[in-house]
Image (tube, rainbow, N blue to C red):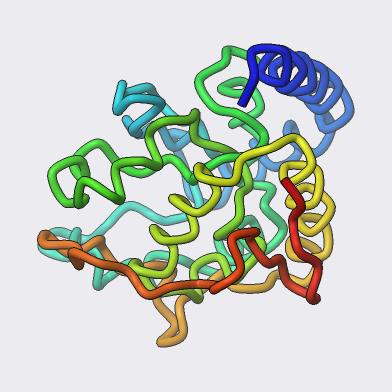
Amino acid sequence: MSRAADTVRRAVDVGVAVVGLLLTAPITLTAAVVVRATLGSPVLFRQPRLGRAGAPFVLLKFRSMSHPQPGREAPEFDQERLGRLGRLLRATSIDELPSLWNLLCGEIALVGPRPLPVHYWDRFTDEQRRRFEVRPGITGLAQVTGRNALDWPQRLALDVQYVEHRSLWLDAKILVRTVPTVLRGVGVDHRDGVTMHELPAAAPASAPAISEDPSPTLPGGSTADE
């Protein structure tokens, strides 16, 4: 990716962040009030995530889960903590609105691999770590191909595939596909009902191929040109 393309990408990110923060202010305020009244404090979920080159940053989202009961903090209890409000916030991606601040600050991009928790760092293979060659994104190739319905090897393979074929044209296609994906609430949960399983401590050494074509194939049969 050329420096000029990176400059264009960053300019778009800043413009979308500013406009998005202004336009969604009423929704953001309403969501904050509802989360505070329903789930209590804090309203925002803050978690260290892995950014470009593995550098950590604090991702901002609206809380979508209730506080865990003593002894039930593990990921397998997430479903009982994720109530009707949490499911609505995630299905509509309203829980992601505070991340526009991360976008404005340059910690994430509009398009890129999803930012993952810091404690996952030692669980990636060398090939999977290629996802950190770019900034993480609000949406990405994995998100428009199935979101959390994909298994970890598939998600990580798509992340690497995105890095290998990254272009402004591919970004544009992913952004276009993101809208119907969010509106339909596709792939919010994994196939067994869990939002997403923890990344295994020993990630597979090789991930299944997503496509024989060197250009990533997006849902609906459209192929991203380089």
x 16%, y 51%: residue: 123
Q: Residue at x 69, y 17 (%)?
A: 10
Measuring from the top left, give residue 107's x and y in whole percent.
50, 20
Q: How many marks are shown on the rendered structure?
A: 0
- Farthest-out residue, bottom: 192
Residue 20, how many percent across, how many down?
A: 81, 28
Q: Nearer the viewer, residue 187 or 156?
A: 156
133 versus 221 height, above or below: above
Q: Is 208 left or right of 10, judged from the image as shown?
A: left
- Residue at 81%, 67% in the rendered image: 222
Name the side, left or right, on which 127 lies relative to 172: left
| Residue 189 screen position, x and y as percent | 51, 74
Residue 201 in view (yes/no): yes
Is 133 left, or right, of 101 in this rendering?
Answer: left
User: In the depicted view, which residue is nearer to us: 23 or 222?
Assistant: 222
Q: Quadrant of residue 215?
A: bottom right
Which residue occupies the foreground of this view, 44 or 154? 154
Q: Quadrant of the C terminus?
A: top right
